Image: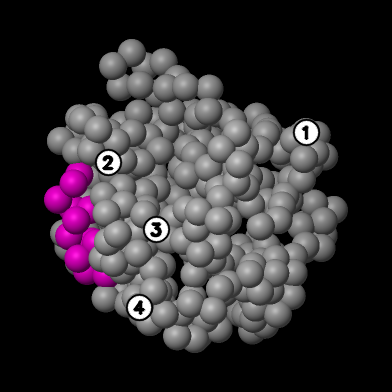
Amino acid sequence: MSDVLEWLLDSDPALRWQVQRDLAHLPEDVWRATRTRVATEGFGARLLAAQDPDGQWAGGAYFPAPAQRPDPEEAGQPYTATTWSLTTLREWGLDAAVLGDTAARLAASSRWEYDDLPYWDGEVDACINAMTLANGAWLGVDVSGIGRWLVEHRMADGGWNCNWVEGATVSSFHSTLNTVKGLRYHEAVTGGTDELRAARRGGEEYLLRRHLYRRLSTGEQVAPWASELVHPFRWVYSVLHAADHIRAASLLDGCAPDPRMAEAIGMIRAGRQPDGRWLQGGRHSGRVWFEVDVEPGAPSKWLTFFATRVLDRWDAP
């Protein structure tokens, strides 16, 4: 076993079970046993302990309750409220059964900050609705209405833009990636529908036509953030964030990785240090319950895991 793999395996259960499954290729009973520990140890247990009696986190749907919001001068949006906490636990592999009647408690007590809309009905932001679509599928909620909303609010160029309410008429890299991620998870859990599958693949085509990082109009890199490798990903786009989704989508669809990813793969590969690790590139500002990754400039187990997983899929015969 390589030094890097041993280093990755010496990690919180939220990461370790994924390393066991996707990089070490250990038997299913091994990684599943590790995944159950997400509920009782480390990051997962700490985040579960922060849940409110009404099923929410920080007293709010997408933003903390007013009494728990950070000082207005504190940089970045907070990541402590319900939607981000649920999304994080889902992505860490928590068994939905651990959350018990959370879905019902949220239906009874949680309302969106936008127009006081019911939680499981979604609101008007594509990224928020996509996370809620995935979280609802995970918790066994009928979120088909959110799925229809996402299909109806797809832009003419193939993707999504969370700023459509403010008049945006072209898609956003960030919004499109967040939306196709939610659609992919929902499809994997429920089987999806032809309409939702077509929307997901259309959004992925939007990104692939741009080679995951270029403007279609000029061929230039869309922005510096496209090549920055930062974990946790949050809502922010990067070639690694996008490539890991395309990797998972290709497995779901039973197809090879798209060759238009080649340049983005080269950018990811170039970030590997001589010792086989990737470095934390920064930190997205905003209040969190606790940090789950290293300071900028330090070797990141999470980024090394994601990058290695993407390259393994790309380099496979």
Residue neighbourhood size for the residue with mark 2, other residues' Cα within 10 Å, grouped as few (<14), some (14–19), many (≥20):
many
Camera sees residue 54 = yes
Q: What label does residue 297 carry, if any?
A: 1
Q: Secondary structure at mark 1?
A: loop
Write down the region rendered in magenta: 143-154
Query: What residue is disc 3 on?
Result: 131
Magenta stretch: dominant SS? helix
Q: Is residue 144 magenta?
A: yes
Query: What residue is disc 4 on?
Result: 108
Q: Secondary structure at mark 4?
A: helix
Mark positioned earlier in the residue sequence (3 or 2):
3
Query: What residue is disc 2 on?
Result: 160
Amino acid under disc 1: Gly
Q: Nearer the viewer, mark 4 or mark 1?
A: 4
Amino acid under disc 3: Met
Q: Secondary structure at mark 2?
A: loop
Q: Nearer the viewer, mark 3 or mark 1?
A: 3
Residue at 22% across / 53% down in the picture?
Answer: 150
Mark positioned earlier in the residue sequence (4 or 1):
4
